[in-house]
Every structure is written in structure tokens, then in C-alpha cells.
Image: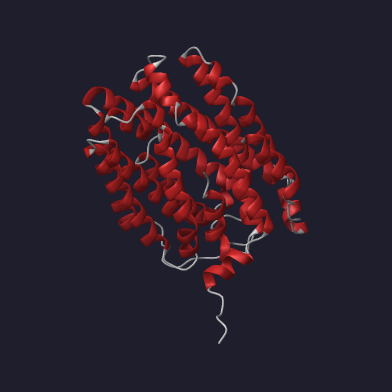
Amino acid sequence: MSRQPTSHKIAIRALPKGIWVLGFGSMFMDMSSELIHSLLPVFMVTVLGASMVTIGIIEGIAEAAAAITRVFSGAISDYLHRRKTLVILGYGLAALSKPVFPLATSSWWVFGARFMDRIGKGIRGAPRDALVADITPPGLRGAAYAMWLAVLPALVAVLLLSVGIREPVLPLHDRERGNRLKLIDGRRLPRRFWLLVLLGALFTLARFSEAFLILRATDVGLPVSYAPAVMVIMSLVYALFAYPAGAAADRLPARRLLVFGLSVLIVADILLAMATSPSIAFAGAAMWGLHMALTQGLLSKLVADNAPNDLRGTAFGIFNMVSGVALLLASVIAGTIWSLAGPPAAFIAGAVFALVAAFGLLLLGPKTEKPRHARQG
């Protein structure tokens, strides 16, 4: 008897070629980024003498800048009907920022390079998220977002995206409706979308910059030369579980998966707060990666499912802007608590935020008990 292919394998085969291109493009860019960003917090503390509050401010402002930029890039991609150009521009700007980091002689140099890198991320973020939804059938969006979010050098990423992906042609009525760029269009975003924006902000308040994971591992004895191992472990777990979690998001209730993801984040925070050795810090980083796998692709899928076709870029821009402002607050709060009360207190505070977010999701969250297909514009 011949064996029938499993639904998991069928889903992988059904993903459009563009999803694979976006996935590998993201992988190469993030490989380039992690080589630098995994050592950056330690470099700032040990070489440049930066305080934890300074690191929190730099990380927070950089991520907030990325988030605010996403609003404009997302709306512009809806207006121009050209998402690929903005995606390539964003990756190119991030690639140009990479040589600045090794030349930095002060925290201001680091801030400038980090700001440039995150602006590039902001330019590409919302158009890329919207492009994933544009080229993927609704029933496979969870798997598709997991595929490109399962990310581990930069010029390869730009080349891949330039030659390997084609944008779909929108229906005529969507093109005509998109030939304007007005703030009033935001009124066409449904109530469920705005609840997701609030939910994303709560998630982000519970999850500050990953720079603090690296600093925590070195704080409990990890040699600086091994600091990148923290991000390797986190990214590896993220990559291993992102696709299964995304595929599950196409079948299982979203609320249940999100609460489970927040529970995993609480465990990660507790492990990092109680860490007395690098091995425990590594376990916390692994759980952090698992929580990212469970939640990030799912949140993107929900945004895509609850936004009109011709406003997807705008919707992703708004969602990421609000989350970015929340990340600014979370990183500054974490850096301040770390400086005043020590590293364990910073992670305990993160666990408390995650617990509040979980209760808020259970009591007030959007009704997401059944996966829904995208709304037509």
C-alpha cells in the first residue's frame, strides 16, 4: 500500500515560490544582523561603558523608529501597488548600515548605525508582511508567515528578492480604490483589527529587547566570545518550531495558541530571572525562541485575515507602529529596573506583563476561536 502524503507535507508543497524567496531572503539578512547584534550589547557595556538604561533607550528608540516607518511604508505600498520595491530598499539600507558597527567609537555611532538598520527594517516590514498575504491562499497563511519568520549576508538577501519574486496584479476595483492615500481610509479597518493592535501592544510590553538576554547570559558567567550562542539557540528553536506552529494556526483556535505562547514567555522570564549559570540562561533563551515561534506568525496571520486587501500594507504598518512604541517603553522599563533592582527583577517584571496580557486575552481579547479567511476588500 502506498503511503499518502501528510497534510503537513501537502501544505509545504502548496506554498507559493515567493514565500520561499522571502524566507531565504529573511534568513540571509538576519544571519548578517545576528553576527553583529549578538555582540553589540556586550560591546557597548564593556568597551563603550554604556549603562543598562542607555542600552534600553537605544534599543527602544531604534525599534520604535522601525515601527513608525512601517506605517508610511505600508500605506505607500498600498498606494503604489508596488511592495517589492520597498522591500528591496529596506534590505539595501540595512545592508549599508552593517560596516558602521565595527567602526563605532562611541554609543552615538552605535545609535546611528542601529537607527539606520531599523529604518531599513521599517521600510521593508509592512510591505513584506502584506506581500506574504497577497501571494498566499488564505488557508495557508499561518504556515506562510511561519516560513518567512523562521529566520536565523545581506547582499544575498537583496539579490534574492530582486530576481526571485513577482508581485500579484490586484483586481481592477482594488487598484482604483488604492489610487489615493488618505488617513480616512483607516476607518475601513474593522473593529477586530483594532483589538489585535491592542493585543500586539500587550504582547510587546511583556517582551523587551533581546539584547537583555545576551547581557543576562554574560552576567551569570558566559564568556563574551560565546555571547552569540544565546542568539543562535534562540533562533534555532524559533526556526524549528515556527512552521509547525504556523501550520497549527491554520487549524486551531488562535486564542488558545496565543495564551500558550504567553505561558512559554513567562517560563522563559522565570528561567532568566533565576539563572545562576550560562546553561540556565540558554534554557531561558530557548523558551524565548519557542514563544516567538508560537506567536509572531500567528499575529501576522490575524492581521492579514482582518484587513481589506487594498489596506493590508497600511494595516501592518499601524500594527507594527503600536507594537514598536510598546517595545520602546518595555526596553526603557527593563533597562531602568535592571539598573535599580538588578537583572532578576527586570525579567520578573516581564513575566508579570506577560501574565497580565494572558488574562487580558482570556477576558477581553478578540473572538478568534475559529481561524478565519481574509476579508475581501
Looking at this rendering, what residue extends furthest in the top direction? 105
Q: Colour scheme of this structure image?
A: secondary structure
Whether residue 160 appears in this view of the structure is yes
Residue sitting farthest toward the bottom? 1
The residue drawn where x is 47% and y is 68% is 251
Q: Quadrant of residue 155?
A: top right
Residue in view at x 63 percent, y 54 percent:
20
Q: Looking at the image, which is closer to me, 99 or 66? A: 99
Q: Is residue 228 left or right of residue 349?
A: right
Residue in view at x 56 percent, y 68 percent: 9
Q: In the image, is 259 to the left or to the right of 58?
A: left
Q: Position of residue 322 (x, y in %)?
A: 47, 39
Above-or-below relation of 247 to 124? below
Position of residue 333 relative to residue 288, above or below, is: above
Q: Identify the image quadrant of residue 159.
A: top right
Tell me if residue 311 can be seen: no
Q: Position of residue 313 (x, y in %)?
A: 62, 46
Q: Position of residue 289 (x, y in %)?
A: 40, 47
Out of 94 and 323, give the one closest to the viewer: 94
Residue 337, percent from left and from top: 27, 27
Seen in the image, is 326 located left or right of residue 282?
A: right
Q: On the rendered image, what quadrant is the N terminus found in?
A: bottom right
Q: Which residue shows up at 53% across the image and 49% down it?
A: 149
Tag count in the figure?
0
Q: Which of the image's four quarters has the C terminus?
A: bottom right
